[in-house]
Image: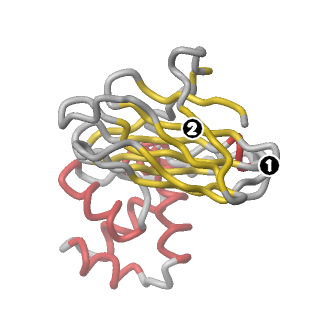
Amino acid sequence: MDNKKVGTLIYRLRKEQGLTQKQLAERLNVSDRTISKWERGNGFPDVSLLAGLSAAFGVNIENILDGSLPANEFIGGNMKKSNYFVCTDCQNIVLATGNATISCCGRKLEPLEAKKATVKEQLTVEEIDQQWYISGDHPMTKEHYISFLALATGDRVQLIKQFPEWGLQARIPKLKYSKLLWYDTKFGLYYQLL
């Protein structure tokens, strides 16, 4: 860890939050001289204070330790290229249009890699009244079910939550050049082009 880089980051984040050294010190129950020492690179926050700094600034502890806030590269506006994250503990679903650091239930989540569904794995898609009617013969048990369906086009994503012990079915407005994605709780993320 580079004390100078960490100190410079603490200074920058404190200024962005509009806090004085004394105000930040009061939040962390340390002296304002301690904050000054950190910002000059002459010391480093105690491990017990890192969570408080993280909360005060709204940044990850890893970024504080690294002394930097790396910016994500803009990937573009094509929503078909969005990243999906699913927490295996609580089944929380997160969608990101670019690279992101996501955590849930205390664990860092990795973006899911969508696999192209084989003919046998594909869902049934029928056109009814200018809508896609999507269904499948998945067992949909509490232990193994499809958590969500998503229909992605270049400019939008429509996400439909599915529930265990319910039949797998959904109606989605028919859009051209669509990509249908779904998350199977045992086998991961799949897609098929419509």
Q: How many marks?
A: 2
Residue in view at x 60 percent, y 56 percent: 172
- Is disc 2 placed on a helix, strand or loop? strand
Residue where numbered disc 2 is placed? 181
Image location (x, y in percent) of residue 43: 36, 52
User: Which image quadrant: the N terminus?
Assistant: top left
Image location (x, y in percent) of residue 5: 54, 48
In the displayed structure, does residue 148 sit left or right of residue 132?
A: left
Residue where numbered disc 1 is placed? 76
The residue nearer to you, when weighing 148 against 32, is 148
Q: Is residue 162 above or below residue 11?
A: above
Residue in view at x 46 percent, y 51 percent: 94
Answer few, some or many: residues within 10 Å of disc 1's Cα (few below 14, many 20 plus, some between 14 and 19).
Answer: few
Q: Amino acid at mark 2?
A: Leu
Tell me which label, 2 or 1, sits earlier in the chain: 1
Residue in view at x 76 percent, y 53 percent: 175
> Which is closer to the viewer, label 2 or label 1?
2
